[in-house]
Image (cartoon, grey):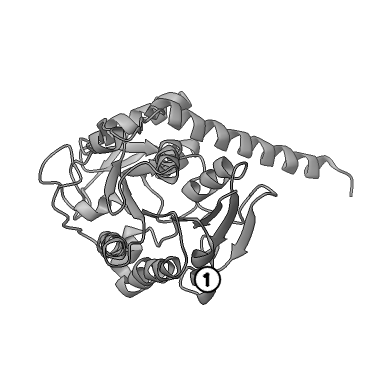
Amino acid sequence: MKKVLITGGAGQIGSYLADRMQADHEVTVLDNLSSGKEPELSKNVRFIKEDIRSPIARELAAEHDIIIHTAAQISVARSMDDPLFDADNNVFGTLNLLEGARLGDPERFIYISSAAVYGDPEYLPVDEQHPQNPMSPYGASKFCGEKYCSMYNRAYGLPSVCIRPFNIYSPRQDPSNPYSGVISKFIGRVREELPPVIFGDGTQTRDFVSAHDVVDMILLLCSGKGENGDVYNIGTGRVTSINELAHIILDIFGSDMDIEYKDPLPGDIKDSYADISKAKKIGYRPQVDLYRGLEEIIGQESLCQNSINGMEQKKQNSPD
């Protein structure tokens, strides 16, 4: 079996990858657990608690056939507060893994970048040739990682490929994270019977893509699809306004609450959605529509909460 290293394997993309690949590959997950969440991995998956900047991470990259680099500092807000921390993780961590891979003989190095590299779109939909003008240290650090990957492909012949996911969501996103995205924030507030808060008029648009679809694309790349040294957008190609997103979540909860509107956030991008025609040429097809994906998140969170409530009720009813 091929040996696969998944960095950030306790996160939403990495953990789904481990689930999907563990039956047919020898999977190692590397994660420093900076999110504080212990991974729930199959017994067939080897877990190593380690940082991507470490010598151990570099050695592991040299030992594996496929390296899937999902680990990152992912908060735009934190990157604005601490650009050095962001670069240390996203630039030097990526470079450490690339250098390890260069010393080995990998079939492919897959780098998970971000649509944040584009900045404020100059035209829509956004294709891979769109100018890259990141508006945050996070976007700049992810773009820098892309450039290192393409340079390692040209200079050293390292078979690397990059993807730029747009707005990823899944049941495994962390709603307790203060830097979580708009979907987590809306669901958290509606669950507490509070109205979703929209900054601006809600006409802003995004391309929300399920983690399951992102994993499908990564598995295509693992199978040898796509060109080394290239980059691919990953989204749905469908536009969803923030107003529409809020109304879908309210509808799934069966709530008739009004939406609360506040002043726009400075620097917020007005519209963004992906041109995925390039990814489609190698077989990518998004399968999860937004309504169904949100139902999955809300349904799983409800099951977890019911389980917790049941355990607490048992404790209260049990004799001392």
Q: Is residue 173 left or right of residue 128?
A: right
How many numbered tags mark residues here? 1
Specify the farthest residue to the right: 319
x, y (%) of residue 44? 68, 49
User: Circle 1 sits on which residue?
Assistant: 59
Residue at horizontal 53%, vertical 43%?
16
Residue 233: % across, % down: 28, 43
Q: In terms of depth relative to the viewer, which is nearer, 293 or 29?
A: 29
Asked whether, in this view, residue 14 is left or right of residue 148, the answer is right
Name which residue lies at 89% across and 50% down: 320
Residue 84 is at least partly visible in this image: yes
Residue sitting nearer the eye, 303 or 92: 92
> Can the viewer see residue 255 in this picture?
no
Kind of residue sitting beneath label 1: Glu
Q: Residue at x 30, y 71 (%)?
A: 83
Residue 300, quarter of picture: top right
Q: Position of residue 160 (x, y in %)?
A: 35, 56
- Position in image of residue 198 (x %, y %): 29, 41
The quarter of the picture where residue 210 lies is: top left
From this view, report whether residue 244 is shown above or below residue 164. above
